[in-house]
Structure formats: structure tokens, C-alpha cells
Image (spheres, rainbow, N blue to C red):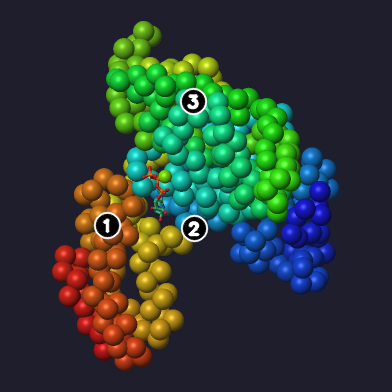
Amino acid sequence: MARKCRRICKVEDSKSKKIVVQSKDGIKTKTKEKIRDDLGSGRIINTENTNKGNANNEILDIKALERSVLKSIIGQDLQVRQIITAIYRAIYFKSMKCNVLVIGNSGTGKTETIKQIARVLNIPYTIEDATKYTQEGYYGADVDEMIYNLLENAKFDVKKAEKGIIIIDEIDKKVGHEEHDVSGIEVLKSLLKIIEGTTMKIQLPTKTWDDDKMIDFDTKNIIIIFLGAFSGLEKIRDKRLNTNPLGFTADNAESKEKLKSRFLKQDLVKYGMPEEFVGRIDTIVEMNKLTKEDLSLILRKSRLSIFRRYQRELRKMGIVLSYDGKLFERIAEESISLDTGARELSNTVNYIFEKIMYDIFANPQKYKQCILDLDIVHDNTKYKLS
Ligand SMILES: Nc1ncnc2c1ncn2[C@@H]1O[C@H](COP(=O)(O)OP(=O)(O)OP(=O)(O)O)[C@@H](O)[C@H]1O
Ligand SMILES: [Mg+2]
């Protein structure tokens, strides 16, 4: 098993926390912290537990993964923890399936969170758009296509792909409590095949057309994550809470609050999801709506911040960017009005840098400093290059 990891680690000195790391480049000694910083290029191993002998004879450090993901994803701490716990459950407990449903508005980090986790854990994934699939297609080549995409992303390493992640986006578009999309429901039902775990015959690409290469692909350990906005689901939850037959008194106000904080499977059934489908979902995650403060923090701190990316690129060109710290709040304020979460941040920031970048590209190596005025959010001529 260890052979499959890019690194093989063992404790050298427990006091200094130095670890022997074997990689393609030979054997090196690194500190545990350094290894954590390298996350993304390999798997982290909790060295204190290496002798406990779990199935893989290695234990991934869940806290290191969480820390790494939270460097990118802002305002979803609880949600990130929920998702990684579900994924770890699937990794550790082979007998347990991992089917997660992530509900949240546009631009709250649904897709990005899974991408970050997969990147750090080095797990192959594919993002499939549920709306692309038709009832007929589902019984034909389309399920195969989904698995094929995963295999392709795993560079056709079958064993690796069998433990990969399939992200099925816009799943809510396949159901609708108002219009009741019957064919959509059939699509969901046909997805049960992968969810339940089955062996599929998949054709691998070959050098010659006539050379068939079919493989058996086991979907038993695949992690399936459904994403969707589910607009209107909140109303169903609110209705349930107000008409709960047990009723709520002042004494159990606290439990009402707890209940309110999560969706129940019955809400999804009311929304129009087939019961047998909902029954197979193990974890429901509700993303937070991002606040103005979250957006500002994304710009300031997140590894994904588009503002920081501009800053980095300018620095590489020898230009220092100067601005008032309040600029982040202004950008956040401007971006939040559209209700597309963090998605709008990149539009606002690109607008801010549009004229600046033209000036810089037109006069290479001329400038050393760029000062941004706070009003640049509304008028992108408000800057000074010198
Ligand atoms: N919580 C967050 N923290 C940091 N950046 C975020 C967050 N949410 C979104 N972003 C930024 O916005 C981009 C879009 O986010 P993402 O693709 O995860 O949205 P989504 O929730 O899947 O929305 P949609 O339903 O529109 O696909 C990300 O690439 C990232 O740069
Ligand atoms: Mg998305």
C-alpha cells in the first residue's frame, strides 16, 4: 500500500519531530510542519499512529487537511469539517458508502470546497452536470461517460479512480416540487446504480481502433457528492417547524433552534426527491450564505483571492501595490448586491485592474508603484502609477 503513496514517512526523532521522507528525489529529513506545507503533492501521515495498523497502514491527518482547506475556503468552517469527515469515513470504513448532498447558494464554495479537498488528498474527481443527462441517456452510454471522465482524470489508474469522487452538480434541477420533472426523477433513480455500488464494463482508450480493451470498474468505494441550490427548500423547512405536531414551547426553544439549523430528509422528499434516492444520502451539508465580512476576508486572506493574485503578479513585474485596508470592504459591498456570493468578487476586481493593466502592458518596466484610491471600486481611473 505504501508503495502507492508518493512519500513514505517514518519517525526519526520524536522530540525534534523530524521525519524521514522518501521521494523521487531521494531521502530527505523534514519537519512535520514542512510536510504539512507541502500538502497537495502527497499524502500526510500522522506519524504518531503509524503502528496502529489501519487498513492502509497509514493515517491521514484530518486536521492538517482541514487547515489547508480553510486557507482557501472562508466562512464555511463547520461545513468543511462535515464534508471532510464524511470523506474520511469512506476512506477508513470501506463498508460505508459516502454520499453527500451539499446545499447552498451560488458562489458559496460548494464546488471549490470539494476541489480543494480532492487536491490536497490527491484523489481524482470529475464534475458532472446533472442537467446534461437524460433519462434515455442514463441507460445508455452516459453513466459510462461519467465513470470514463473519472478514469481519465485518474490518468487511467483504475484502482485510484475506484476511490475517486464524482461531483454531480445542479442535482436540484432534476427535481422540482412545483413542476415535477418526471424524467428528472427517473434520472435520479437510475443514478442509484452507481450509488449502490456495481461493477461496470468500461472501455479504455487504445492505440488502435479495433483493439477492444474493456475493464471492470467497481463503483462500491466511489464517493458521490451532489451539489445544488435547492431554492425554496428553506420554506419547506420553515413550514415543518411551524406545524410540527409536537409543538414548541419556550422550554424547548433551544431544540427548535437546533432543528432549524439543519435540513431533514423529509424536506427533500417534500421538495420532490424520490424517497429511495434521499434514503441513500448519508450527510446533508448546508452552506452558509456569505456575508460582507466573509467576502472581505476572502479578498484579504483566501489563497483563492483574485486581488492577491493581481498583487502577486504585479510584484513579479516589480510593481508594489498600495491601498487603504478599507478597499476590501468597499469591494465586498459592491459585490454582495448581486447575490452570487464570492463569484462576483472576480468581476469587481477585474474591473478595478482593467485600466491599470493596460497602462502597465503599454509601458513595460516603467512603473514601480501603483496606488489605488478607495473610489476605484466605482471608477477604475482612480489610481496612480509611478
Ligand atoms: N467560501 C469561499 N471562500 C473562498 N472563496 C470562495 C468561497 N466560495 C466561493 N469562492 C470563490 O468563488 C468561486 C466560485 O465558487 P464555487 O464554484 O465553489 O461556487 P458554488 O457554490 O459551486 O456556486 P454555483 O452553484 O454557482 O456553482 C471559487 O472558485 C472561489 O474563488
Ligand atoms: Mg458550483
- Residue type marked 3: Glu
Question: Comparing marks 3 and 1, which lies closer to the viewer?
Answer: 3
Q: Which mark is residue 60?
A: none
- Residue type marked 2: Lys
Mark 1–mark 2 Cα distance, whole angstroms, equals 19 Å
Question: Farthest residue in the top direction?
Answer: 245
Left or right of 175 on screen, residue 42: right
Q: Which residue is mark 1?
A: 332
The local secondary structure at tag 3 comes to helix
Q: Which residue is mark 2?
A: 71
State the residue at coordinates (29%, 20%): 178
Q: Is residue 1 visible?
A: yes
Q: Is residue 92 visible?
A: no
The image quarter containing residue 326 is bottom left
Tags 1 and 2 touching, CB below 8 Å:
no
Q: Which residue is mark 3?
A: 136
Tell which circle, 3 or 1, labels the residue nearer the N-terminal end: 3
Question: Which one is nearer the viewer's eye here, 256 or 386?
Answer: 386
Left or right of 11 on screen, residue 96: left
Residue 296, percent across and down? 32, 58
